[in-house]
Each structure stands twice: as structure tokens, then as C-alpha cells.
Amino acid sequence: MDVTRQTTHITGCGSCTLKCLNFEVHKNHKDHETQGLSKKLLVVRRGKPFKLTLIFENVWNPDSVSLVLEVCLEGLPQRVPVLSCDQLSDPLSGPWSAKIYPGDILSRSVTIYMCSPVTAPVAQYDLTVLTETRQNRSSYKVKPFVLLFNPWLKADPVYMQLDVDKEEYIKNDHGVVYMGTNLNVITRPWSFGQYEAGVLEACLKLLQVSPHHLSNKYKDYRRRRDPVYVSRVLCAMVNCNDDLGIIKGKWQGSWKDGVRPTDWSGSAEILHSWVSSNCSPVSYGQCWVFASVLCTVMRVLGIPSRVVTIYNAAHDTDATLEIEEFYTSKGEKLNMSNDSIWNFHVWVECWMRRPDLGAEFDGWQVVDPTPQERSNGMFVCGPCPVAAIQQKRFDVQYDAAFIYASVDAEVIRVIVHDRLQVERMVDTESVGKLIYTKKVGSDNPENLTQAYKGKKRDKQAATVRGTSRRGRPSLEVSLKIDGMVSVGESIHVSVTITNHSSSPRILMEHVNAQMKEYNKGPKQCFWKTSRKVHMQPHQVLTLQDQISPSEYESALAGDNTVNLAVVIKDVWTEERVLATQEFNISSPQIIIEIEGENRIQMNRKHKAHVSFINIFTKALSPVLLTVTGSGLLEEKQEASMLHLMPGKKIKKNLYIMASSPGTKLLVATVLHSHYYIVAKSFYKVSVIPA
């Protein structure tokens, strides 16, 4: 077999014996925009002809020997007679077709262009060549090939018009995930890895082990022509809650029996682990891991996709489109609600037409693989048109009401005193404050908020106002954090109070700060202050507070998110007003340097230096610096110190070497006490051929 040309040698008998078949892999992959997806299989897109060259032992005469190509999906064969050009039907509306290249008749080498209908199921197909004469029939089973959706073809429901969009949402194997809070957006790189060996095969296997396929493979194959159906199947299969899915989610507890969700930086390693463990779930993932892996699988199979982050995303468990939050009269947030608001949540948008809904709902569709609520009995969400969310069309398939609540639910904040509700405030602005995805051709964010909400929102509003709901509001309070806070800096808090009444007032101010993780309720208070305030009629007064690093460092955990709240109480009337704000404290940086900057040559060693300076006010005891890099390092590199004093440095020198071109990631992590992540940094490396 000519490995370079992917020529398959076969044997048979008959008056015209087929010697070999050349899949013309290089040309076909270039023509079908599938370069790099597989080194073993021919990968083509539906509705577009692909080239096959048949070589016979002797001259093929079409008058005495007819050719038939048979494509088969697990016992579902389709015969495709090889015809001349003038006999060929329309490949877009007709069945599979195959035509002889002009000039190849009466030759030992015959070139055939084969084409699937644009509605063909996405799958791996077996291929058999049949030669038939009046006396006998010979069959030659050759290697299988893979058929994908075709966003380059206008007739395909996943068609995208602009080449730059297809480059970004299909071919780009590197992206970013936005995390943190809307006040301090954190950009984290992610390697989708669709060109890594074995990834295509893992994505195809995902379809083959789905409950839909295992229960009725023939029905599943018929429905795989529809990207709406395929995206819903894939969404359910990325989590493992109902099936042999890829990832097991976990949001609290120990990670000792798996991998911390924050340790993942690419999809390929997760997919490889799932396949090698015979479809056992990979531990563990959270929303950005689920979404990024789903984005990889969608892009591989030909559905344009992108990762989207929603800041202040509501999880509406009771389908009321309202989220209740409870606070004490001194501003401490309580864990009293089944509903929650995540500081950020990540899902996927995929691009397709929706003939089942109508042209107004074509375009981007939300699919959310994070297992939160069941849809039709399974942990799956979407696809739901973004246009339906903007129009509040809750009747539109799938899960429109749940997705709408995620981006636009109302927040009901309740002040509780002596187990009684003493104040109730409604916030219509906080949820879905900011919605981001990666820009085409750039790592900068694109703001999608208007696409979901239909109007522009202040993407960096740092002020949250509270007003009394007892009739006409007479008291108003706003809470503001000055600037973006980094570890080692003080937190500057401004509380502005407005007295709308014509009477003087005596007020009590209570400010409370609690740490929380991005998707959970708050922890115990780590800082609070109170003071008495005298106000004149119609006065506006701004109060300043400061939280020093020594007051919050010992409480840092997770992604360093703080829930801050202020309650203002009128001493005479007992009227109370609440304002809240959540923000994240940026982690310290790990310095990663590579000799020769960020472009390296394949198969050559390059020296790298990784270092971290302790900017905390206390020693880190012990501290561990780790460096990993898929495609750059064979194993994890580590450096440790028993005590890293304030201002001192820990450093690791190492060598990296890449065996394949493309974008790779070096990931450095500093852990304190072998558990708490103090800092994590990423470094993109561009690998070029030597």
C-alpha cells in the first residue's frame, strides 16, 4: 500500500480485476476543507464530489463490465451505479451519485467522482466496489470513509456565507473562554484540538454509543442528516448523567480521584481519556469544560460553533423567571434558595437553519451541555434560537424559557430580620449583565448581549442601586468598587446614599464581605463594618471603606470571588435598603518565558523559564509550582519549596520540544498546601516546521 497516497490494495476475481483504489486523500482533503482531521481515513463533506481512482489489472471496458459503488451504514447498503456525465442526476436533491471522469474509458486507471446527497447522514461509511458482467460479479471491500456536514455548501443547513466565519467557527483549533465577573473579565485559552490524532474517531464514537443509536440505529442514522437532531444528541452525550457520555461534573469536594476542572486546558486529552477507558466518564468538569468539549465535537463534525460566556447567569429551578436571594439586616447573604446566580456560565452557540421553526429562527442556536435541568427526560438543553430568546418566544423548541431565565430573569432580594421578611427589592438588570464570545480572528471579546436582550446594556457598570419598596422610595443606596482589584491590593468601597425625603435622617450603615465560588452561595463573612450616619433633607452622601490585603488573603479560595453587600437602615422608621455587588480579585501572575519568544521550531529543544514571586503578606507553606504542556512536554514538571516567604521567588527551568505544528499551550500552576490554587498562567506557543 502506498501510505503517502492512501492507496488501498485489494484482491478479487473476474474478467476485470481491481488491483487497487486510490482515495486521493491529499486532493480530497484540500477540496473539502478537512486537512488534518485524520491521517487514517478519507474525510469528506456531504453534497460535494470527491475523487476516487480505480486501477485494474487489465483494461476496463464499460460495455462489458459495469461498475457499482456500494456505501453502507451498518447493514444499510446503498448501490451507486457509476454513470457517465450525461446520465448523472442532481447530487443535491437525488441519491448518491458517481460519474466517470471524461477520457478514462478503455483504460486500466479510471477516475470517478462520487457525491453524497446534501441530506446524507453524518457518519463513517463502509465502501465496496462491485464489478459486474453477464457471467459474474466481484466485490472489493475497501477502507471506510467519513462524511461530515458541509458549511461551505449553500444547500446544507449549516452553511455559513463568510469564509472568515468558517475559518473561525469550524477550522480554528484554538480559542478562549471568558471567566471571572463582568467587572473583571478573565481570558483563559483553550485548545479545541480537532486536528489531534484520534479526536475525529472519538467524535464519531460518541454518536455510535448514544442511547438514540443503541436503541434504534436505523432511525438514528436517518435522523443524522439533521443538524438540529445531531446537536441535541451531542449536547446530551458530553455530560455522562444519562448515558455513556464524556465528562462527569463536580462542583465541590475533593478532586483526588480525578482531575480538577481548572486543570484542563484542551479537549483532546479529555476525548482520548474517554475512548481509552472504554467510554467511562472523565472526572471532572464544570461548565467551561463541558462547553469547550462540545464545541470541539461540533466543529469536527462540521457544525459551526463557538463558546459563549454569560455573566450573572441565573439557574431558575422552579421555572418562575425569578431568582430569590436572602440577606440579613446587616448585609450577610444567606443560603436559603434553590435558585442561584452564577458569576459566569459557559455554553455553546451553533449555527444552522431551522426549517422546523421557520426562517426567522435561523442562525445561532444555544446548546448547553452542563447538566442542570432535564429536558424531555434527559440532561440536555437546546438547540434554541438566540432570536427566540430575544423575542421571549418560550414556545420555541428547545428549552427557551430556561435559557431566557439564564440571561434575563428578575432577581428578588429579600432582607430577613428575626426570621421575618422586612424588605423586598426587585432587580431587573443584574442577570445576563454581559455576554461574551471570542471575536473572529482575534482573542478579544465580542459583546453578544444585545443579540439576546434586544437592547444595549452597560457592559462595565460597577454600581448596583437599591431602593425601598414601601410605596414611593425615599431612600436610595449604591455600592461601587473602585477599579479592578488584584491580590496584594486594597479593596476600595464607595457607598452613596441619597435622602429623597424633606426630613433629616439618622441611618445605620452595615457593609459585609463574603467569599464565594462562581456558581455557589457565599461562605462565612471575612470582613464587616458598621457606622451611624446623619443626613440632611435631600442630601447625597458618599461613604468610603477599605479592605486591606491582610484582611482578605486568608479567605481566598476558588476563583477569588467576593459577595459585597450594604444595608442602610433608618433608625426612626426602620426602613431598610440593600445594595449588592460581586467581583473577583485577580490572581497573581506566573511569569513564563521561552528563549526565542513564542515561536518555536518542530523537533528542536527550546529552553523555558517559569517563575512566581510571592506577593502575599504571609509565607506560602508549602508551595508547589507545576508546568504542563500537551504536545510540548512528555510529563509534568515540578518545583517545590517548604516555605516561600513574601517577596521571594520560586523558579523552574525546563526544555520543551514539539513534534507537530500548530498552537500549543504551556500551563503553569502554583498550589499552596497541595490543594488551593494560588495562581495559574497560560502561554501560547506557535510551532512551525523545522
Image (cartoon, helix red, strand yellow):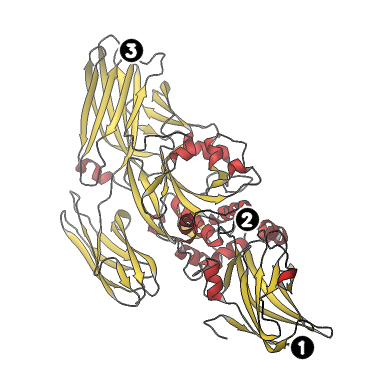
**Which quadrant of the structure image shows residue 327?**
top left
Q: Residue lying furthest top in this view?
A: 502
Q: CA distance from mark 1 to mark 3?
A: 102 Å
What's the residue type where badge 2 is placed?
Ala
| Residue 585 image offset from top left, x and y in percent | 28, 44
Q: CA distance from mark 2 to mark 3?
A: 68 Å
What's the residue type where badge 1 is placed?
Gly
What's the residue type where badge 3 is placed?
Thr
| Residue 393 image offset from top left, x and y in percent | 58, 35
SS at mark 1 in the image:
loop
Residue 625 position (above or below residue 616): below
- What residue appears at the point 57 percent right and 77 percent down from the top-left corner? 24
Q: Residue tagged by mark 3?
A: 573
Q: Callout 1: few (<14), some (14-19), or many (20+) C-alpha neighbours within 10 Å?
A: some
Q: Residue tagged by mark 1?
A: 14
- What residue appears at the point 32 percent right and 21 percent down from the top-left corner? 476
Name the mark on residue 496. Answer: none
Q: Residue tagged by mark 2?
A: 155
- What residue appears at the point 35 percent right and 71 percent down from the top-left corner? 688
| Residue 136 image offset from top left, x and y in percent | 81, 85
Residue 21 position (above or below residue 571): below
